[in-house]
Amino acid sequence: MKKIIKNGTIVTAADTYKADLLIENGKIAMIGQQLDESGAEVIDAKGCYVFPGGIDPHTHLDMPFGGTVTKDDFQSGTIAAAFGGTTTIIDFCLTNKGEPLQKAIETWHNKAKGKAVIDYSFHLMISEINDDVLAELPKVIEEEGITSFKVFMAYKNVFQADDGTLYRTLLAAKELGALVMVHAENGDVIDYLIKQALEQGHTDPIYHALTRPPELEGEATGRACQLTELADSQLYVVHVSCAQAVEKIAEARNKGLNVWGETCPQYLVLDQSYLERPNFEGAKYVWSPPLREKWHQEVLWNALKNGQLQTLGSDQCSFDFKGQKELGRGDFSKIPNGGPIIEDRVSILFSEGVKKGRITLNQFVDIMSTRIAKLFGLFPKKGTIAVGSDADLVIFDPNVERVISAKTHHMAVDYNPFEGMKVTGEPVSVLSRGEFVIRDKAFVGKPGSGQYIKREKYGKYAMSTKDEQLTI
Ligand SMILES: [Zn+2]
């Protein structure tokens, strides 16, 4: 059935204007004034913004880690995402050394099948490069539409790849049309610092942060940028947490390198002191990279504002406090890393960013949706409001106030790291390909209705850093 969204203010990465939207066959069919309502269901968006649905480029749903599995799977995780105004996620497909990539991809398809309530896609982790992997990569891109590869520079003896693997992945990505993503922390030095701390009897959560200092994120970020320059390739640095890393990304971009950076809500509003909370509560705030001293927050906000960082991911990777985070009692290195963020990513960016005057409304849409769509080959199907684009839409009340709490969130975990935080602005209704997933703040979607999205190669819509600098 046709739908018309009336009386809303449409906001894209470029424009803000009042118009009606006609949705037909899951797509935006027309944008205009006083559209013909006959045969259409009319949705009143008075007093609300209408945004393109959020795209979360960084999630870990149903993922094994540290002897346990993330609590949110593709059902609870995508329902929570939808409540928060996100209509597409790109999840990380983990691979095992010596195993065909295709096998890992099938495992991930099976995790999502029948569960996702919004559309989804995958990034592929690269842990080694050999003839078998190189032979499989073209198929991964052409047939699976997976056009981004993730390399870990940290988690020694678990996920960490060596520099040779990173360099060869950058070369392969350049040739095949993919974007290389890095977790940039110096895993070797961190491994030494962790051993040293434990030997000295330092076992509390705060030592998670103290053994992963920002210098080691800056160093790894700089190294990845240099290797990208040498390979003449393209790089996306995930979860940037500190000034040292922002500096390296800015330096690379000033040289005209195609280097992009993502940060996450937790780094924008939480800080290292949370890890010192008593009764092991600090474990709730263990991420890698760790939360930093408060002064880094302003650096990150400024980087989003001036375009040195371009996107916001959630790094959704949720574990219960009871029974999961608690695995690290008596040894901070055994605390599962990560937190439940998927639901509040968009709200926090709006409330702390737009409402507090740190970024503009159009920048907000760019950071949480449009730029991500362009970098990861989803644009213009996703990430904008234009005729022919998927009707992935958020009707957003910019003035309502709410308090974030585990009591009311929709993630499957027993705590929320933003507990008690007041935010302004909330999605009222969310549509995925023209169908309501959230209607008047209630879930009306259907598990399994989310579709797997094959993505375009890197470069089709991602503007190069050089072109971008010319247009500023
Ligand atoms: Zn992650």
Image (tube, rainbow, N blue to C red):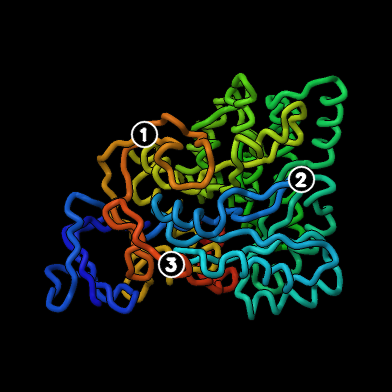
State the CA–CA distance, disc 3 to disc 1: 30 Å
Above or below for 201 versus 354: above
Residue where numbered disc 3 is placed: 382
Marks 2 and 1: which is nearer the front?
1
Q: Is residue 307 left or right of residue 179?
A: left
The tag earlier along the polypeptide, 2 or 1, is: 2
Q: Is mark 3 within 8 Å of ligand 1?
A: no
Residue at point 78%, 57% (across, down): 166
- The local crowd at label 1, few if under 14, some if 14 to 19, many if 20 or more residues have their Cα within 10 Å, is few
Looking at the picture, how far across and down is residue 284, in whole percent? 60, 33
Residue where numbered disc 1 is placed: 403
Above or below for 187 versus 372: above
Marks 3 and 1: which is nearer the front?
1
Q: Is residue 449 visible?
A: yes
Residue 431 placement: quadrant: bottom left
- The local crowd at label 3, few if under 14, some if 14 to 19, many if 20 or more residues have their Cα within 10 Å, is many
Element assignment for label 2: loop
Above or below for 183 versus 233: above
Above or below for 76 versus 354: below
Element assignment for label 3: loop
Element assignment for label 1: strand
The tag earlier along the polypeptide, 2 or 3, is: 2
Looking at the picture, how far across and down is residue 245, in whole percent? 65, 40
The tag earlier along the polypeptide, 3 or 1, is: 3
Q: Amino acid at mark 3?
A: Lys
Residue 204 placement: quadrant: top right
Q: Is mark 1 within 8 Å of ligand 1?
A: no
Q: Is residue 51 left or right of residue 178?
A: left
Looking at the picture, how far across and down is residue 333, in whole percent? 76, 34
State the CA–CA distance, disc 2 to disc 1: 35 Å
